[in-house]
Image (cartoon, grey):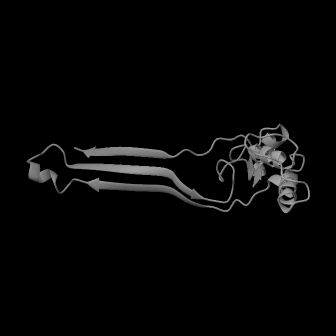
């Protein structure tokens, strides 16, 4: 998946990762980070990582987007068997439930949500994350009454 949100940040100086790496190789400042000595293994590793955050190359922001997601869980309970013992004649059934959506996701993708598309459902732009909002976690409590 192309993480254009991170690429956009790298191009305009708003990428935390790129800014920290720049400070480590002496190409900028970042609070609490000092530059590594040139020629050390740490400097070489930081310089190579910094090169892979160059915003001029889209390929630097293509990420693995495999995922496992717990999309929805719902549980409900019917009080139908309990209602007759209450000498209640108007209510035939009472069911209460609780549901949750987008509860858990496991992915190596660093963007907001692996199931995003910058242009909604258009098939030509699938796998392109650009300043889009993630799918929210939603909790729902519901009740159904049968008269």
> Quick check: 48 left or right of 102?
right
> Quick check: 104 left or right of 10?
left
Q: Quadrant of the C terminus?
A: top left
Vertical comparison of 42 with 87: above or below? below
Which residue is at a point 81% across and 39% down the rendered structure image?
A: 29
The quarter holding residue 107 reads bottom right
> Quick check: 93 left or right of 48?
left
The quarter holding residue 145 reads top left
Q: Nearer the viewer, residue 127 or 27?
A: 27
> Quick check: 56 left or right of 135?
right
Q: Nearer the viewer, residue 40 or 1?
A: 40
Which residue is at a point 77% across and 42% down the rendered structure image?
A: 15
| Residue 132 pos. (x, y %) | 68, 41
| Residue 13 pos. (x, y %) | 82, 38
Number of marks drawn: 0
Which residue is at a point 68% across and 47% down the rendered structure image?
A: 121
| Residue 31 pos. (x, y %) | 74, 39
Vertical comparison of 12 with 89: above or below? above
Q: Quadrant of the N terminus?
A: bottom right
Residue ranking furthest to the left? 87
């Amino acid at each position: 998946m192309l993480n254009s949100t991170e690429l956009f940040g790298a191009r305009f100086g708003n990428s935390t990762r790129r800014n920290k790496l720049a400070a480590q190789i002496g190409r900028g400042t970042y609070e609490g980070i000092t530059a590594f000595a040139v020629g050390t293994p740490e400097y070489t590793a930081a310089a190579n990582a910094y090169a892979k955050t160059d915003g001029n190359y889209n390929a630097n922001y293509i990420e693995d987007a495999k995922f496992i997601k717990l999309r929805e869980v719902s549980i409900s309970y019917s009080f139908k068997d309990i209602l007759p013992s209450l000498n209640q004649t108007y209510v035939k059934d009472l069911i209460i439930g609780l549901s949750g959506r987008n509860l858990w996701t496991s992915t190596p993708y660093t963007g907001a949500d692996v199931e995003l598309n910058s242009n909604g459902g258009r098939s030509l732009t699938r796998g392109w994350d650009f300043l889009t909002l993630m799918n929210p976690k939603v909790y729902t409590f519901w009740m159904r009454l049968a008269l």
